[in-house]
């Protein structure tokens, strides 16, 4: 299975945390809704078909997400020593850097082909 652009963004979103020593898997366990993409410091709203996109991390190590209306499921693991989240689905894995994690905000960094973009997720 090929990983889509939004899956890459979702994976990167879960990668490097600024205060890694204070983070744990429990901090991720909730439903995160995409709020914006950040490119070169400028925020951009998601496209119309991405407005309802989310990723939900469960405490049993699984996740479910929606990417442009397509539901996806897999497993996830927090790598505290590397400040990354590893998302696995259908035998493929991606390691995403977590830039910021708070109770209501998750920002991940996605890098591909020399380009990078941050994705900001929020929770209720």
Image (spheres, rainbow, N blue to C red):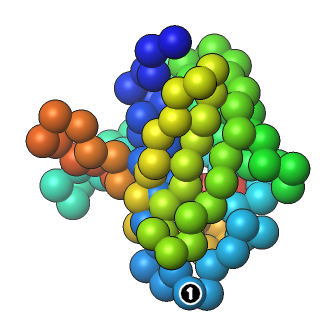
Asked if one can make out residue 124 in the rendered structure from this viewpoint, the answer is no
In the depicted view, which residue is nearer to us: 89 or 49?
A: 89
Tell me: 117 left or right of 35. Answer: left
Q: Residue at x 49, y 61 (%)?
A: 84
In the rendered image, residue 91, in percent from the top left (x then y), is placed at 59, 24
In the rendered image, residue 106, in percent from the top left (x then y), is placed at 55, 61
> Toward which corner of the image does residue 28 lie, by quadrant?
bottom right
Bin the neighbour count of mark 1 within 10 Å (Cα to Cα): few under 14, some 14-19, many 20 and up: few
In the rendered image, residue 107, in percent from the top left (x then y), is placed at 46, 60
With respect to residue 95, does 45 lie above or below? Answer: above
Q: Give the farthest residue toward the right.
A: 60
Tell me: 22 left or right of 115. Answer: right
Tell me: 82 left or right of 58. Answer: left
Q: Give the farthest residue toward the left.
A: 114
Tell me: 67 left or right of 8. Answer: right
Q: How many marks?
A: 1
Q: Residue at x 77, y 58 (%)?
A: 29
With respect to residue 3, does 31 lie above or below? Answer: below
Screen quadrant of the C terminus? bottom right
Q: Secondary structure at mark 1?
A: helix
Q: Give the farthest residue toward the front.
A: 91
Residue that numbered label 1 is attached to: 21
> Toward which corner of the image does residue 18 lie, by quadrant?
bottom left
In the depicted view, which residue is nearer to us: 111 or 68?
A: 111
Q: Residue at x 56, y 72 (%)?
A: 80
In the rendered image, residue 79, in percent from the top left (x then y), is placed at 56, 64
Asked if one can make out residue 59 in the rendered structure from this viewpoint, the answer is yes
In the depicted view, which residue is nearer to us: 18 or 49?
A: 18
Q: Residue at x 62, y 61 (%)?
A: 78
With respect to residue 101, does 37 lie above or below? Answer: above
């Amino acid at each position: 299975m090929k990983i889509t652009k939004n899956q890459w963004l979702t994976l990167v979103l879960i990668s490097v945390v600024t205060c890694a020593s204070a983070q744990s898997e429990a901090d991720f366990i909730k439903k995160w809704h995409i709020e914006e993409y950040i490119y070169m410091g400028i925020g951009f709203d998601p496209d119309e078909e991405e407005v309802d996109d989310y990723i939900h991390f469960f405490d049993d190590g699984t996740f479910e997400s929606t990417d442009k209306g397509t539901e996806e499921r897999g497993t996830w693991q927090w790598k505290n020593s590397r400040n990354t989240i590893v998302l696995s689905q259908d035998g493929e894995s991606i390691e995403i850097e977590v830039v910021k994690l708070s109770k209501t905000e998750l920002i991940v960094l996605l890098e591909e082909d020399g380009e990078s973009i941050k994705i900001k997720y929020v929770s209720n």
